Image (cartoon, grey):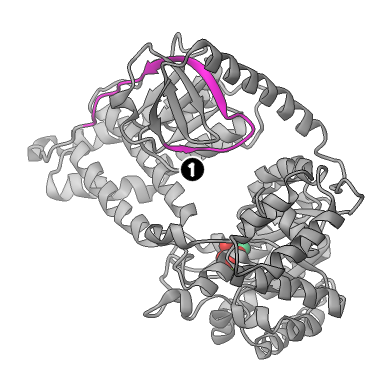
């Protein structure tokens, strides 16, 4: 057996595939600088618009081929591309360049693509990087029509492992119909729509495996281990049998997990745990609901502000929140007030400073600019008339920020009362604990708030002094660092002492390595990506809270001597 290449597994229930390699060669989309004669300019504009129309027809055709039993949100990946195609922000500038500078359609589109990509690159946010992949996929589709390079036809792919430089969400849907065994791409990240689709359609896949299409041969027999991001060639019979058994076990486990989505999350020794979902867009509600989320623990509302110049008004906030609240059918929705700035820059560049992560972001920005904050607060209050809503304040550092935020909230309540508009007068107001200063002072926060939620993504960033979006520092980003664990324990204990619920909505809450430790620390509310809910529910059923809390005590007695997560795993291996 040889490990042929390494990439990033997209995650999800399906991680193993066996099959022959199908090398999908599309050839490079080679666009060179070129111009058209003045008398042909209008023909060129028509050629460009014609290519967009053909791309639209192709995508609608793909949409029509989505199997009936596919989750309904899958079609939205294609709709995103259709919307991009129809958006004047994509086609307006190339047409301008053709008309005013005489550029060829391909060259005008390529230049516009490059300038849009530069904007995406500045943003650095994983979610926006996903949009960058979408942009590439849409532009490449139009370019291949203009260059008359036909998109690959997917015949005869059944049971094969597809190798490609990159794949679009539309490709993935067509390949799912062809019943491919899995795929490997040279490029792309785990947060791209292509990866999300593969995860949600249960296709084992590895992305970002640089050089895969160069070093693997068409037709050779492969094993794909997406859990470890590895593609293997030359496997002997014993290896093949091992992975075939793993694949069969995965299929039956996925089936079983889905059937238990509505079961209460409970540990083996009967501790009830609340499992909630983190969402970014109203569309995420469907999967959260389907995977049995008991509510929304974190709604990241700043995504309403992305990719636009002017902020949404109160009405837009309200209709969006109401859709989420109604979608959750009576289950609580925790709406986080704006966390703009740092890694979540709005289109108008608000927030920032010379060091954005330590700058005027989140609650600081809102308190400084009430005209930004108040429409959102009023909208959240109005949405609370349609179902249980909680307000959550991000990035609190000092307790006076709570008092100031509450003043604004009470002012909004008075305004709504005067206008005779309904809202929940007892709406719970909670705060995120994501700055070490707040964690160390958690009792004071617990005394002033209705609930706390630990945002480990930022808490780790600020505790360990590492920029969370700097890829070069990934190796220092450690949820098991003793200082991080001490702070988390501080917050959980403060909640228990004051009698205020404490949850966690950072990535750690959905991380299988950390869940047992957190249960042992006494955490009972976990909010995570909707796709992680099924696995965590199943994991909880195997845990014994009492034994885990004993192991936590032992780990804390030895915090400086060993790697805390490793020691904890060792102590609890037999549990
Ligand atoms: C966090 O910081 O852990 C968190 C949940 O918030 P975000 O990732 O949106 O900053
Ligand atoms: Mg945060």
Residue shown at 73% from the left, 41% from the top: 534
SS at circle 1: loop
Q: Is residue 25 magenta?
A: yes
> Residue 83: percent from the left, percent from the top?
47, 42
> Residue 457: percent from the left, percent from the top?
57, 64
Relative to 353, is 545 on the left or the right?
A: right
- Which residue is outermost to the right? 270
**Viewer-nearest residue: 463 or 451:** 463
Q: Can residue 82 be seen in this view?
A: no
> Residue 293: percent from the left, percent from the top?
77, 49
Region in magenta: 7-29
Name the residue carrying label 1: 190
- Which residue is outermost to the left? 37
Residue shown at 79% from the left, 47% from the top: 540
Q: Quick one: label 1, few (<14), some, or many (20+) residues within 10 Å?
A: many
Residue shown at 75% from the left, 62% from the top: 552
Position of 5 relative to 366 (above/below): above
> Residue 145: percent from the left, percent from the top?
29, 27
Quadrant of residue 121 within the rendered picture: bottom left
Position of 130 relative to 438 (above/below): above
Relative to 79, is 488 on the left or the right?
A: right
Residue shown at 87% from the left, 57% from the top: 546
């Amino acid at each position: 057996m040889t490990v042929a290449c390494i990439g990033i597994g997209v995650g999800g229930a399906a991680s193993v595939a066996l099959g022959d390699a199908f090398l999908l060669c599309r050839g490079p989309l080679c666009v060179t600088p070129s111009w058209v004669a003045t008398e042909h300019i209008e023909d060129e504009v028509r050629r460009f618009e014609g290519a967009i129309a053909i791309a639209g027809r192709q995508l609608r055709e793909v949409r029509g081929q989505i199997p009936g039993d596919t989750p309904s949100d899958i079609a939205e990946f294609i709709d995103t591309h259709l919307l991009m195609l129809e958006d004047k922000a994509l086609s307006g500038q190339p047409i301008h360049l053709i008309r005013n500078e005489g550029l060829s359609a391909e060259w005008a589109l390529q230049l516009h693509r490059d300038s849009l990509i530069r904007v995406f690159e500045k943003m650095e946010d994983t979610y926006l990087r996903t949009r960058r992949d979408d942009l590439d996929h849409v532009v490449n589709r139009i370019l291949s029509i203009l260059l008359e390079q036909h998109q690959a036809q997917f015949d005869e792919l059944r049971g094969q492992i597809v190798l490609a430089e990159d794949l679009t969400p539309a490709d993935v849907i067509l390949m799912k119909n062809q019943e491919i065994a899995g795929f490997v791409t040279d490029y792309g990240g785990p947060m791209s729509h292509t990866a999300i689709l593969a995860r949600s359609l249960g296709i084992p896949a590895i992305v970002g495996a640089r050089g895969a299409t160069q070093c693997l041969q068409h037709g050779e027999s492969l094993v794909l281990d997406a859990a470890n991001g590895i593609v293997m060639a030359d496997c002997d019979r014993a290896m093949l049998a091992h992975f075939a058994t793993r694949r069969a076990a995965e299929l039956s486990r996925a089936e079983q997990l889905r059937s238990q989505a509505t079961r209460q999350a409970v540990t083996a020794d009967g501790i009830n745990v609340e499992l909630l979902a983190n969402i970014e867009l109203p569309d995420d509600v469907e999967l959260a609901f389907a995977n049995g989320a008991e509510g929304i623990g974190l709604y990241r509302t700043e995504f309403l502000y992305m990719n636009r110049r002017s902020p949404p008004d109160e009405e837009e906030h309200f209709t969006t929140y109401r859709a989420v609240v109604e979608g959750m059918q009576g289950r609580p929705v925790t709406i986080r007030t704006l966390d703009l700035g740092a890694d979540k820059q709005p289109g108008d560049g608000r927030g920032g400073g010379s060091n954005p992560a330590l700058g005027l972001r989140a609650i600081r920005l809102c308190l400084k600019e009430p005209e930004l904050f108040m429409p959102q607060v009023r909208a959240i209050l109005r949405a609370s008339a349609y179902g249980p809503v909680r307000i959550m304040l991000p990035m609190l550092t000092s307790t006076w920020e709570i008092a100031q935020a509450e003043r604004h909230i009470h002012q909004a309540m008075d305004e709504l009362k005067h206008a005779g508009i309904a809202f929940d007068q007892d709406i719970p107001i909670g705060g995120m604990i994501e700055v070490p200063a707040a964690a160390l002072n958690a009792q004071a926060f617990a005394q002033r708030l209705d609930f706390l939620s630990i945002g480990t993504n930022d808490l780790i960033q600020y505790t360990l002094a590492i920029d969370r979006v700097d890829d070069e520092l990934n190796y220092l980003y450690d949820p098991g660092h003793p200082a991080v664990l001490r702070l988390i324990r501080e917050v959980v204990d403060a909640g228990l002492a004051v009698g205020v619920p404490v949850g966690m909505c950072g990535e750690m809450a959905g991380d299988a390595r950390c869940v047992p430790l957190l249960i042992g620390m006494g955490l009972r509310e976990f909010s995570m990506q909707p796709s992680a809910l099924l696995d965590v529910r199943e994991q909880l059923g195997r845990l014994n809270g009492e034994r885990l809390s004993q192991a936590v005590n032992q780990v804390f007695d030895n915090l400086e001597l060993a790697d805390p997560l490793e020691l904890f795993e060792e102590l609890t291996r037999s549990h």
